[in-house]
Image: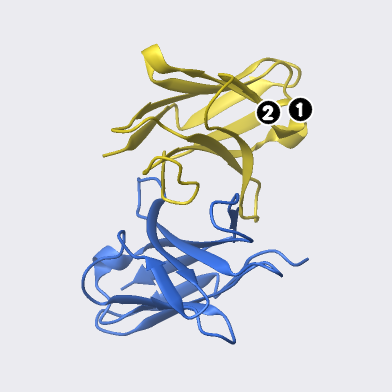
Chain colours: A yellow, B blue
Amino acid sequence: AQSVTQLGSHVSVSEGALVLLRCNYSSSVPPYLFWYVQYPNQGLQLLLKYTTGATLVKGINGFEAEFKKSETSFHLTKPSAHMSDAAEYFCAVSGERGSNYKLTFGKGTLLTVNP
Amino acid sequence: NAGVMQNPRHLVRRRGQEARLRCSPMKGHSHVYWYRQLPEEGLKFMVYLQKENIIDESGMPKERFSAEFPKEGPSILRIQQVVRGDSAAYFCASSGQYNSPLHFGNGTRLTVT
């Protein structure tokens, strides 16, 4: 079975500060890992994903995440927060090898950016 | 905007009634997926459909829940004889091809009173 734990349901940073959103997973198969973002009043959209190969994955809007198998982690980072980054972020793991759709999501982390 | 459209945004039903949730995929997408987010939990996969076919329903509850994606019109998630435990946010997603990235709608918040 697959599961995702996002540490911190709410993270608050100042504009220009480092963003770090934590995600740990468990998976019975080699995982595909995803980060989705949900802006207010919008649907979830894919930020980035890890399938195989390079463990540092770059996504949209300057975000990146690193897959660390030994730590079963896939933390999301951005060097400098912008006001427009305020949103809810969801980490997800694939329930089946090679599947992009049978996902199990974490509970989400709400990111607020203070001026 | 040709994004994934879900309606209604909010739905209130009394115990024992039926709930019908609709999802129109993005233009050009023929693959539809339904997810459910129970209170204090993350989204979980329910069912994957293509036009007129259920491809994977491994996440669907065995009773009272059904889904369809007819040749014409939106995909429908139907919950019969709703109970309070069905109260959740139901999200629909679509993709253009199998295993392409998913595009999600805003969700339907179902409240059972």
Q: Which residue is mark 1?
A: A82
Task: Name the outermost residue toward the top.
Answer: A70
Q: Specify the label residue A44 is tagged with.
A: none
CA neighbours of label 1 inside 10 A, class few (<14), some (14 to 19), many (20+): many
The correct choice, above or below, for B30 with respect to A114 in the image is: below
The chain letter under disc 1 is A
Are callouts 2 and 1 both on one chain?
yes
Residue nearer the viewer, A51 or B26: A51
Does A111 sit left or right of A79 as displayed? left
Where residue A102 sits: x, y (%)?
A: 41, 50
The chain letter under disc 2 is A
Quarter containing the C terminus of chain B: bottom left
Nearer the observer: mark 2 or 1; the answer is: 1
Quadrant hosting residue B38: bottom left
Distance from Cα at disc 2 to Cα at disc 1: 7 Å
Residue nearer the viewer, B2 or B16: B2
Does B25 sit left or right of B86 as displayed? right
Q: Earlier in the sequence, mark 2 or mark 1?
A: 1
CA neighbours of label 2 inside 10 A, class few (<14), some (14 to 19), many (20+): some
Q: Residue at x 26, y 79 (%)?
A: B15
The correct choice, above or below, for B70 with respect to B34 in the image is: below
Quadrant hosting residue B72: bottom right
Q: Residue flagged by tag 2: what amino acid is it?
A: Val
Q: Which residue is mark 2?
A: A113
Q: Residue at x 45, y 46 (%)?
A: A99
Where residue A74 sits: x, y (%)?
A: 49, 23
| Dot 2: element | strand
Q: Residue flagged by tag 1: what amino acid is it?
A: His
Quarter containing the N terminus of chain B: bottom right
